[in-house]
């Protein structure tokens, strides 16, 4: 796909539902006794893979013509033996959280995924789940495919996360639901808390206490989950792309509706405001226990800033597009605490650095850091290797809207994993992007 210099983006849009909340709504709905109705579910490939996995484990899942998803759950501990492997496609979130669901259920299941997912490490999740009694075996070390044998007599644990990871935390909390006694997770830095919020709403026996800069979360097992209606707010990670596009494209003003503003997810918005971004938060409100609002975004002259490492958990998926904003700013932007980027759908830290260099931007990449020298208007003209990573593809298409020469990404097909309507939404706002034969 190719993106060309654009100006004057305008319109009022709603990006797809939040991916993190969509995954959790399907999983926790599958554990409830009765029917959970989900509105606004993200219908990208990653979330659909989770829906197929929940159905394979025994939940009845149906989408009706009005766009509402109905999940008839089997109760905590009620999953049945799947007839075949559980294929999570490109979804690390779906695979890692579902490892927790199966780890304390007395069944065996093979977890697999696409070529990209099979390269990504699972040890951070499987290590604590093994302490709870699950067994994992495979031919590729801690990578998928993995045969998971759930514990017949699960053991509660007290576990301190070695690194901040909402996926690891959530896997343990989900495993704790079918474990006797009290399981405790301590996170050194507060990470996204959608699992905790949703488990509480469904009736789990869960307690959260602030501890230093992090949290101590405790779950007492065997509580019956009661179905709840869920309305999924707009995904801030998806909103990040039109948000940055409007800031760096001259003469733009757009409104992004119903965006999730959970404090553990708004790091990008806070950082862009620090960089001088004209972002107004309107109509703030609560929806399903989550704070949401509308973002009014106008083109702005951005300046480089230092982004503290402790902010990384609140915006880890947004660093590729933040790096694009930094390239279009004046001055140096320094980002730290980025080690997690190296184990995402690709080594995102390396992919971002290579993509910026290919488009004439000076960048320094460390083991867990990135420094971008802003140029106001980057040269562009490069071809970016996406490494099958949807966020790399979308981030560099955004760069092309503000660069002097077109920016090409080698593959845009995987964008459908998280943002199926990305091209239509962006071109509807006025962005010039498409396949090479269309872009001119």
Image (cartoon, rainbow, N blue to C red):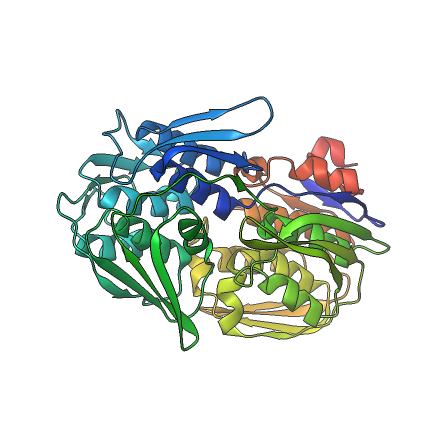
Q: Say which quadrant the C terminus sits in.
A: top right
In the figure, residue 1 lies in which quadrant? top right
Q: Residue furthest left?
A: 153
Identity of the residue drawn at 64% across and 68% down: 271
Residue 403 picture location, percent across and down: 75, 55
Residue 41 picture location, percent across and down: 54, 37
- Residue 385 seen anywhere in this rendered image of the structure: no
Q: Is residue 430 above or below residue 284?
A: above
Is 25 on the left-hand or right-hand side of 234?
Answer: left
Identity of the residue drawn at 21% across and 42% down: 138
Identity of the residue drawn at 45% across and 58% down: 193
Q: Is residue 287 above or below residue 277?
A: above
Please tell me which residue lies in front, 1 or 164. Answer: 164
Residue 295 picture location, percent across and down: 72, 55
Please tell me which residue lies in front, 33 or 312. Answer: 33
- Residue 428 seen anywhere in this rendered image of the structure: yes
Residue 418 picture location, percent across and down: 54, 41
Q: Is residue 411 above or below residue 187?
A: above
Identity of the residue drawn at 26% across and 24% down: 83
Is 332 on the left-hand or right-hand side of 58?
Answer: right
């Amino acid at each position: 796909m190719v993106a060309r210099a654009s100006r004057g983006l305008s319109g009022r849009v709603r990006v797809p539902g939040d991916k993190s909340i969509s995954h959790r709504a399907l999983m926790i709905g599958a554990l409830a006794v009765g029917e959970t109705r989900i509105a606004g579910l993200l219908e990208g490939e990653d979330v659909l893979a989770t829906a197929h996995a929940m159905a394979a484990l025994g939940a009845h899942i149906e989408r009706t013509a009005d766009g509402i998803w109905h999940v008839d759950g089997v109760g905590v501990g009620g999953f049945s033996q799947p007839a075949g492997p559980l294929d999570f496609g490109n979804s690390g979130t779906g695979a890692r959280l579902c490892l927790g669901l199966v780890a304390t259920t007395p069944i065996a299941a093979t977890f697999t995924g696409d070529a990209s997912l099979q390269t990504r490490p699972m040890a951070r999740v499987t290590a604590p789940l093994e302490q709870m009694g699950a067994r994992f075996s495979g031919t590729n070390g801690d990578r998928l495919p993995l045969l998971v044998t759930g514990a017949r007599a699960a053991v509660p644990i007290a576990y301190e996360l070695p690194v901040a990871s909402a996926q690891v935390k959530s896997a343990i909390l989900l495993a704790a639901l079918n474990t006797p006694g009290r399981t405790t997770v301590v996170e050194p830095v507060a990470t996204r808390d959608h699992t905790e919020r949703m488990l509480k709403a469904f009736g789990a026996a869960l307690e959260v206490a602030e501890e230093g800069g992090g949290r101590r979360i405790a779950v007492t097992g065997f509580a019956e989950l009661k179905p709840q209606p869920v309305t999924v707010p707009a995904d801030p990670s998806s909103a990040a792309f039109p948000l940055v596009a409007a800031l760096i494209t001259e003469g733009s003003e757009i409104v992004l509706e119903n965006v999730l503003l959970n404090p553990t997810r708004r790091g990008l918005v806070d950082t862009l405001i620090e960089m001088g971004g004209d972002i107004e938060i309107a109509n703030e409100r609560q929806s399903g226990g989550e704070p949401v609002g509308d973002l009014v975004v106008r083109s702005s002259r951005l300046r480089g800033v230092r982004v503290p490492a402790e902010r990384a958990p609140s915006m880890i998926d947004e660093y590729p597009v933040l790096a694009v904003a930094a390239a279009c700013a004046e001055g140096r932007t320094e980002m730290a605490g980025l080690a997690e980027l190296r184990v995402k759908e690709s080594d995102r830290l390396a992919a971002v650095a290579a993509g910026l260099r290919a488009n004439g931007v000076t960048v320094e990449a460390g083991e867990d850091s990135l420094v971008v020298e802003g140029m106001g208007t980057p040269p562009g003209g490069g071809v970016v290797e996406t490494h099958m990573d949807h966020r790399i593809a979308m981030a560099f298409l955004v760069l092309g809207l503000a660069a002097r020469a077109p920016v090409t990404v080698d593959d845009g097909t995987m964008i459908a994993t998280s943002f199926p309507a990305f091209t239509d939404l962006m071109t509807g706002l006025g962005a010039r992007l498409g396949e090479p034969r269309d872009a001119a």
